[in-house]
Image (spheres, rainbow, N blue to C red):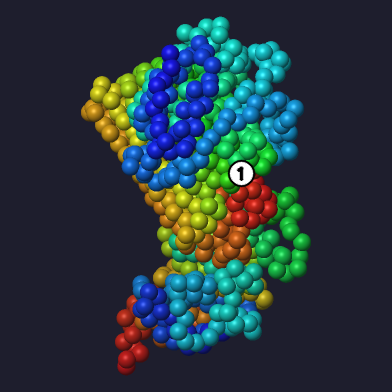
């Protein structure tokens, strides 16, 4: 099977280059799903501001680029720790390294109790039908455009099966390290949480070297009955980096997920979260901490679907924008017919730290049943002058007072983190992005 | 210590203070009384350095320095303290951190080293005991979830820790029950000292039963229209503010 030529010389260079990558791929056990995804992607093309969830993010510059596959690098070519104060002192059950989307597995990882760590390619060869369960059907929804491309083009990926209750977090360290300015990587992660299991998984995205590839990452999370997961994705790449990341969460009966999206780096970061509460009693708490800095553009899309009765979702987003940055937070809660007693809350707050920064928040609700409890609120403003005056009147200098207020603004997200080691590591990384970081450290 | 001459202040385009004159010497306690809307809180806030209040005329000197030329934080470090009528809640900023930062800012300004963490904790616990505050307040955000009375106690606690030269307490007594009023008064009295001064802004004479003022001033219509000793407060309580206005006209 092969896809007929879909692009023409009039198509954007990026699209043509993705098609060329696809044509160069050898067929593997996942080929049917990949082919379907690629066809759909080529048919729909790159998203544009005409697409509902892409209104604020223009990809024209990216469309004019021709991309090539980012290189496969060995563990020895990467020195991640040099650039990673985030990891200092964090007790971990394991660190799994992924470089440009290729997992670099350590033989020791196989010995950790309660979790199976494998390469997607390896498992696809052994049991393709099992792996196909985790590849989503092709969708026309515009927020899923880059997931289609990821499904078609991921070179390998990481499959984690959580079988027990893990007490310490597991870290997935995604390192982007290109050889040229036009590299692209499609990292893929599958988290398969067995019934009653629990774990904390931190995906940390960093870059190394001069060239950071375009990153199109996708994480698929399946929580079986009563499974619990605390999942973090932390973006800390360089100011020139472009990152599209999608997390899909599928939750069975009584499962609980806390998801944290933390944007501390990157030039253009698009972070999508789709939560699917498909069985009774499933609960999803999502927290977004979006820091706009310099010229950074952060576009966050959360879509949570209540597909069963007695499901619960909370979305807490805190956005800060300084300099010329722009932060967008779009959240949507959909309550399907029959999902009675659904309970959802959306709270988005934005804090503008400069007159040239911009924050757009848009909470939305789509309800197809009665007997639900759905609340939403969105506010954006500057630092509260009364709070600032109060602190100044106690003798604090202005910079300290402002930093403390900025940090306080983020407290609702930080206090949601139940793993204290992860929280303090993230606080540390966050503080270094705020003005007067030295001062703030003294207050912790 | 504090000398206010012909202070005229506009708030949102409206003239609120219309030439206030007041002199407070070290060691004295002054009470400023007056009806609602007379400009009492505006005076307190403008002395503390509120930026959106526009001084259109007059001068304020504090220990010989031009107070109005200093930003709020420098006024505080120079030894001025405002107890807020409505203390602000600042969720996410720890009550004790704020106080420690405030104390250290003041010490730094005076060329003193930062306070030792253990010494500070001992100091604050001692003052909290005096103010009959639960140690639970140590871990809370600034005024977060405090009742009205707790907020006022917290203001006085801050004052006791910072030991200002001049404390301006803006209706610190309002909203307090009689027990809390006694505690707050004790806190204020513990600060009385020949080197310090206190300005109490209040509606009611009640506080002045516990903190005996040296002078009482009546502020109304943006001016101080009458001054006297503590008996003036009692007279006001009996006869109301209209009496001052009428006797002035007569």
Q: Secondary structure at mark 1?
A: loop
Residue that protrudes farthest toward the front in the picture: A9
| Location of residue A420 in the rendering, given as x and y in whole percent from the top left corner | 61, 34
Residue at left offset 41%, top offset 20%: A3
Residue B87 in sight in this render: no
Residue at left offset 52%, top offset 37%: A66
| Location of residue B28 in the rendering, given as x and y in whole percent from the top left corner | 59, 78
| Location of residue B143 in the rendering, given as x and y in whole percent from the top left corner | 51, 53
- Residue ID for mark 1: A238
Residue A105 in sight in this render: yes
| Location of residue A321 in the rendering, given as x and y in whole percent from the top left corner | 50, 52
**Nearer to the camera, B138 or A272:** A272
Left or right of A346 on screen, residue A67: right
Residue at left offset 70%, top offset 68%: B109
Above or below for A405 versus B35? above
How packed is label 1: few (under 14 Cα within 10 Å), some, or many (20 or more)? many
Residue at left offset 42%, top offset 36%: A9
How many marks do you count on the picture?
1
**Nearer to the camera, A428 or B114:** A428
Above or below for B25 versus A408? below
Q: Provide the chain ID for the residue under circle 1.
A: A
């Amino acid at each position: 099977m092969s896809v007929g030529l879909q692009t023409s010389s009039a198509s954007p260079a990026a699209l043509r280059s993705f098609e060329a990558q696809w044509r160069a791929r050898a067929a593997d056990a996942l080929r049917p799903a990949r082919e379907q995804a690629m066809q759909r992607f080529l048919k729909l093309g790159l998203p544009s501001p005409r697409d509902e969830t892409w209104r604020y993010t223009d990809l024209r510059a990216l469309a004019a680029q021709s991309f090539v596959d980012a290189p496969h690098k060995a563990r020895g070519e990467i020195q991640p720790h040099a650039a990673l104060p985030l990891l200092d002192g964090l007790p971990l059950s394991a660190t799994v390294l992924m470089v440009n989307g290729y997992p670099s597995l350590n033989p020791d990882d196989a010995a950790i109790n309660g979790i199976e760590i494998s390469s997607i390619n390896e498992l696809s060869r052994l049991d393709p039908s099992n792996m196909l369960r985790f590849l989503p059907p092709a969708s026309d929804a515009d927020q899923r455009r880059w997931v289609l491309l990821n499904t078609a083009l991921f070179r390998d990926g990481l499959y984690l099966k959580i079988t027990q209750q893990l007490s310490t977090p597991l870290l997935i360290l995604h390192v982007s390290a290109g050889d040229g300015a036009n590299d692209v990587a499609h990292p893929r992660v599958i988290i398969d949480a067995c019934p009653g299991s629990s774990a904390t998984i931190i995906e940390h995205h960093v870059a190394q070297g001069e060239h950071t590839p375009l990153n199109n990452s996708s994480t698929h999370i399946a929580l079986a009955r009563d499974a619990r997961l605390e999942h973090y994705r932390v973006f800390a790449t360089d100011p020139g980096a472009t990152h599209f990341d999608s997390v899909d969460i599928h939750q069975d009966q009584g499962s609980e997920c806390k998801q944290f999206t933390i944007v501390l780096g990157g030039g253009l970061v698009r972070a999508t979260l789709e939560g699917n509460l498909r069985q009774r009693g499933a609960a999803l708490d999502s927290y977004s901490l979006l820091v706009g800095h310099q010229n950074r553009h952060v576009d966050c899309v959360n879509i949570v679907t209540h597909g069963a009765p007695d499901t619960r979702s909370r979305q807490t987003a805190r956005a800060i924008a300084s300099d010329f940055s722009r932060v967008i937070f779009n959240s949507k809660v959909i309550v399907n017919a029959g999902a009675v007693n659904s309970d959802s809350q959306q709270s988005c707050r934005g804090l503008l730290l400069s007159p040239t920064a911009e924050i757009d928040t848009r909470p939305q609700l789509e309800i197809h049943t009665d007997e639900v409890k759905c609340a939403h609120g969105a506010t954006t403003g500057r630092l509260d002058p009364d709070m600032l005056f109060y602190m100044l009147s106690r003798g604090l200098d202005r910079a300290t007072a402002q930093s403390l207020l900025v940090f306080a603004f983020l407290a609702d997200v930080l206090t949601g983190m139940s793993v204290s080691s992860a929280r303090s590591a993230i606080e540390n990384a966050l503080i270094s992005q705020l003005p007067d970081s030295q001062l703030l450290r003294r207050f912790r | 210590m504090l000398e206010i001459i012909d202070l005229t202040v506009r708030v949102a385009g409206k003239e609120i203070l219309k030439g206030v004159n007041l002199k407070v010497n070290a060691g004295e306690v002054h009470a400023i009384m007056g009806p609602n809307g007379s400009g009492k809180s505006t005076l307190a806030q403008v002395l503390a350095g509120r930026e959106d209040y526009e001084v259109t005329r007059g001068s304020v000197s504090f220990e010989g320095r031009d107070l109005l030329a200093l930003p709020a934080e420098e006024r505080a470090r120079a030894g001025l303290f405002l107890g807020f009528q409505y203390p602000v809640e600042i969720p996410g900023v720890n009550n004790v951190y704020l106080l420690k930062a405030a104390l250290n800012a003041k010490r730094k300004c005076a060329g003193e080293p930062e306070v030792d963490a253990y010494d500070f904790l001992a100091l604050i616990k001692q003052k909290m005991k005096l103010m009959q505050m639960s140690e639970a307040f140590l871990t809370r955000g600034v005024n977060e979830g405090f009742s009205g009375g707790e907020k006022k106690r917290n203001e006085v606690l801050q004052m006791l820790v910072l030991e200002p030269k001049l404390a301006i307490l803006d209706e610190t007594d309002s909203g307090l029950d009689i027990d809390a009023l006694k505690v707050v008064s004790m806190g204020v009295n513990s600060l009385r000292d020949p080197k310090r001064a206190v300005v109490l802004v209040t509606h009611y004479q009640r506080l002045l039963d516990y903190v005996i003022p040296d002078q009482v001033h009546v502020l109304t219509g943006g001016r101080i229209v009458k001054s006297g000793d503590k008996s003036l407060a009692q007279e006001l309580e009996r006869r109301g503010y209209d009496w001052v206005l009428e006797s002035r006209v007569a």
